[in-house]
Amino acid sequence: MSRSRPLRVAVLVSGRGSNLQALIDARAAGQLPIELVLVASDKVAAHGLRRAEAAGIATLALTPRSHPTRAAFDAELFARIAASTPDLIVLAGFMRILDGAVLAPWHGRIINIHPSLLPRYPGLHTHERALAAGDAEHGSSVHFVTAELDGGPLLAQVRIPIHAGDTPETLAQRLLPHEHRLLLACVDLIARGRVELAAGEVRLDGAALPAPLQLPAHGTTFA
């Protein structure tokens, strides 16, 4: 199902926003059929907000401490996001666990990029954990978001080898450009109406994916 207009995308960030910048740059270069309608954060000082402002994108900063409960914060955040009428929400380095009640209306319309080969290493410190386990490879995953932490249906992954002498820092640095490519490729599929979440399974061009798509080491299209 192709789309007749650009996909309206809201992005949630908590930090530097490098994945957001990749989306901004691809959109500006005409490589992604999307419109970035809002960048929201739980941290007023998040550099991702500055990136959005520089690109002329509307921003929103809400502090959890100004709300009586986590659920109250999530409810206001998603009410404000809904007001921007996005077709898709992208969690790009958003470091909060979200309440299942606010996620339910967005089922199939919210994705997350996570720096591990899920289901390995949900949560934090993924680079350290991959090294500690003696893994031969590492990577990033894009999945549809559910109430389970980093546990929603997988859309795609990118893999890189772990080198002898890698540290968490060098591993993260080598993975980051591949992570950017992965996110752009996934958003492109969704923007072109080729991917959907239906009946709990990820479908590409109407057919259920038996396994996550794999992005090659180079390029922007899936194998």
Image: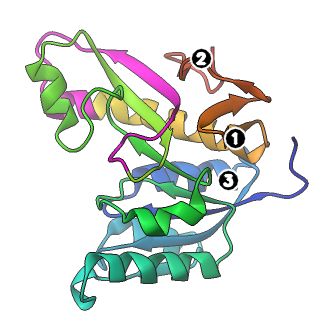
Q: Residue at x 54, y 18 (%)?
A: 211
Look at label 3 and name its amino acid: Arg
Span highlighted in magenta in the image: 148-172
Query: Is residue 141 in view from this perspective?
Result: yes
The answer for how far apart the CA atoms under marks 2 and 1 are is 14 Å
Who comes first in sequence, dot 3 or dot 2?
3
Instruction: Answer left or right for 145 relative to 149.
Output: right
Quarter placement of the N terminus? top right
Q: Earlier in the sequence, mark 2 or mark 1?
A: 1
Q: Is residue 158 found left or right of 118 in the rendered image?
A: right
Alpha carbon separation for disc pair 3 and 1: 21 Å
Quarter of the rendering containing residue 89 = bottom right
Residue at screen point 69% across, 41% down? 196
Label whose residue precedes the other's in the sequence (3 or 1): 3
How many badges with numbers are in the image? 3
- Picture disc at residue 196: 1
Residue shown at the point (86%, 58%) measured from the top left = 5
- Nearest the viewer among 223 and 97 is 97
Q: Nearer the viewer, mark 3 or mark 1?
A: 1
Q: Residue at label 2?
A: 210
Residue 64 in which image quadrant: bottom left
Q: Name the residue carrying label 3.
A: 27
Q: For mark 2, does the 10 Å Cα neighbourhood hold few (<14), some (14 to 19), or many (20 or more) residues? A: few
Q: Position of residue 68 (x, y in %)?
A: 24, 89
Q: Are marks 2 and 1 in contact (CB under 8 Å)?
A: no
Per the image, is 160 magenta? Answer: yes
